[in-house]
Amino acid sequence: MRYCLLLLLFVYAPFAFAQTSDAYVQRGNAKANAGNQQGAVEEFTKAIEVNPKNINAYFYRANANGNMQNFKAAVDDFTSVIELKDNYPNAYFYRANAKSNLKQFKEAIIDFDKAALQNSRNADIFHYRANAKLNIGDNAGAITDFTRAIGINPKKYELFEYRGVARANIHDYTGAVADYTQSIKLNPRNADVYYYRANAKSNLADFRGAIADFDKALQLNPRNAEAFYYRGNARSNINDNKGAIDDYNMAIKLNPKLTDLYHYLGNARSNSADNKGAVADYTKAIELNPVNAELYLYRGIAYKNLSQADSAMEDVNRAIRLNPKYADAYLNRAYLHIDSQRFEAAVMDADTTLLYSPKNDNAFAVRGKAKYYMKDTTAALEDINKALELNPQSETAYNTRADLKVDMGQYAEAIKDYDKILAINPGRTDIYTKRGDAKAGAGNNKAAMLDYEKALELNPKNEQAILNLGIAKDKLSDYNGALKLYNAGITINPKNKFFYLQRGITRSHLDGSRVALLDFDRAIAIDSNFAEAYGNRGLEKLRDRDGEGGWIDLNHAIQLNPAPENYLLLGGAKMEQKEYQGALDYYSLAIEKAPRNIKAYMMRGITKSLLADTAGCFDDFNTAFKIEPQNENIYIERSKARLNLRDSIAAVKDCNTAIDLNAQNASAFLQRGVAKFALKDSRGAIQDYTEALRLQDNLKQAYIRRGEAKARLRNYVDAITDYNTALTYNDRDKQAYYLRGLARIAQKEKDSGCLDLSKSGELGLKEAYDAIRKYCN
């Protein structure tokens, strides 16, 4: 920030002259004092014509020319004065000012030097010489002169203001803030000084202090577009992206020529997860500056966040064509290659990034990620460790390592890395969302929800956090809470297909197939190639007894995207139909596609247990353990398989190990309770179900299971209470109605009990009608 104030201070004093020349001078001064500068010049010229050595006539004509902005003529007249009398008062000083106005700063400084020798107590000489030095980049010299002027006149607020500017120019922002503060004490109504101090505070990373000063500057001058602009930057730095967007919009409104603002507006929208808005802003910026490689890169990143991979790649490639040595563009193209599973291409782009930026920690991190997916885990971790060696505060390196740990099922280690990122940057909404995912993966859904809620506190329109919080609530059987979130997400973005998909899944749990099918239809209407929506619609059609339509959708899902997740869906469909061999085949195909997919091994292992293939079952679980040896969820799933194989004691032991690995995993206690119940240990089962509910108080299945154990102990009253609670989470749970019906009949509440059995049968449980025939007729 540079600021220079140049003033010409010319004083006209009436003098009495004996000769005619002096009379012209008197008339010239009178006209000058009346504001008639041109008339004054004419009178002074006549005086010079009469007496070419009338020094006062030259001096006053120079003043008049200066006041008419005719600085060249002023310099010539002051030169004549100096030639006639070298020590004429203020001649060098005024000529220096005139030369400064002609931007002849070096020549002006020579004159200021001579003026200072003539009068070392004139603060203005040092003040204006400092201004001239500022204009030639001699900030140190300017600071010395401002300091000299302050020593002479310590009450002049401008001197502190301009010395602050000079100090800011040499990056002495602390000194600049001190000078601006003193200037404000002397003149608290100067909007410019608040503005300058705000910028200095921003450079000291005191963004909140800067915002307070920008507020004051705008209070004094509400039309300062640059103040809105830079306050927006400060707000962006404290993750107040909404405030930043408001400020940038106001700056553009006040000054549409601030074209760079569209760039920063795009950044703020991107940071607030409004990637659609970011794309629009970057597009506007590109229209104004079509050869700016950075704009194409940032728009490409926004497209990536919108899952528009082709548009993202096109923009990043354009950035590289405009700037073939653009390290950040190669880096982001590496990320795009990873998303498209082009891992070797990702490594090549990371290598190119390091060619142009050898100490780029992010490049080591992304290369490590690509190497991990190329199954070179050792080299991958070496790269990530190198990134952290270069930058111990590297958010990207911790993020990458955490992502890999999640992929490896090492959720506790991943959470530690996400914790480190949030210690460095507490405003990262994406990291709260990711840490929530890791906690959910570790079975701690309550803790996961707290992270999603924190992400939404920071950005209420964060679609991914809304989606994931809804999924977590669905897992915990809080279906109404999940639906509320999906509805809110759809209000924010009615084109987000994932909200309709997940709402359909939740509605399947809550309302049944027909309502769910409507949401799957809506998701497919948004994206006719949405394989996951076809897969889930297929499952619902099967549940709705539309076998032909169901399998058409499921097979179409595979045709659109033969990803392991879709083979898992087909396997799940076969499991629901109790076609275990068919399920086995689909799980095997999922493993062929993704040999490290833990879920596929676990599901195939459980399927083999249902087919009494004990050896094959344990082979699959052992493979899963080799991939993720610390994943407690594998022990939980193997416990289920052991129950299928009638080995309840071993099932309990597996749950013990899961609890040893993670004592906060409610599912581990729930499953151990199931295993104990199978061993007729009802009291032990109740104890485990209760612990599961302590960890996760809306775990519907724990209430149902605990009610079942209490009923076995003939504690029907408490059993019914648990079934009632379960039904508050899902009033269409056929199993809860069935068990409550049996408990009520045991309590001699035959009418209400038989109505419960009827409701259960209505919802599709065949055993309910068997019970009605036995107890209700």
Image (cartoon, grey):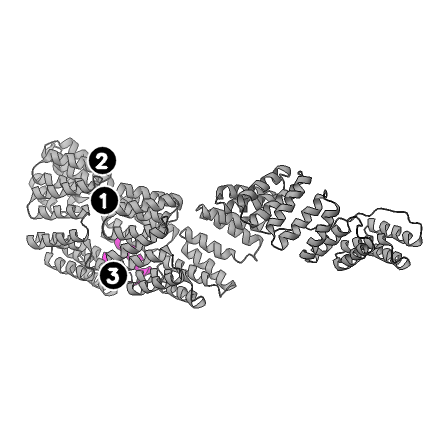
Question: Earlier along the polypeptide chain: callout 2 or callout 3?
Answer: 3
Q: Nearer the viewer, mark 2 or mark 1?
A: 1
The verdict on residue 517 being magenta is yes
- Foreground tag (2 vs 3): 3
State which tag comes first along the sequence, 1 or 3.
3
Residue drawn at 54 percent across, 54 percent down: 252
Task: Tell me the quarter of the image containing the C terminus.
Answer: top left
Hey, what amino acid is under mark 2?
Arg
Mark 1 touches mark 3? (CB < 8 Å):
no
| Residue 253 in the image, given as x and y percentages of width and height | 56, 53
State how far apart marks 2 and 1 are (Cα): 14 Å
The residue labelled by disc 3 is: 374
Residue placed most toward the observer, 650 or 83: 83
- Dot 2, crowdedness within 10 Å: few (<14), some or many (≥20)? few
Residue 167 at x, y percent in the picture: 57, 47
Q: What's the magenta region? A: 515-536
Q: Quadrant of residue 561?
A: bottom left
Dot label at residue 694 = 2
Vertical placement of residue 706 versus 60, above or below: above
Give the residue number, with chain letter if any, for mark 1.
Answer: 443
Amino acid found under the numbered disc labelled 3: Met
Q: Quadrant of the rendered structure where residue 179 is?
A: top right
Helix or strand or loop: what does disc 2 sit on? helix
Q: Are the residues flagged by discs 2 and 1 in contact, CB closer than 8 Å?
A: no
State the mark number for residue 187: none
Residue that appears at 42% across and 51% down: 271
- Marks 1 and 3: which is nearer the front? 3
615 in the magenta segment: no
Q: Residues within 10 Å of mark 1 (few under 14, many from 20)?
A: many
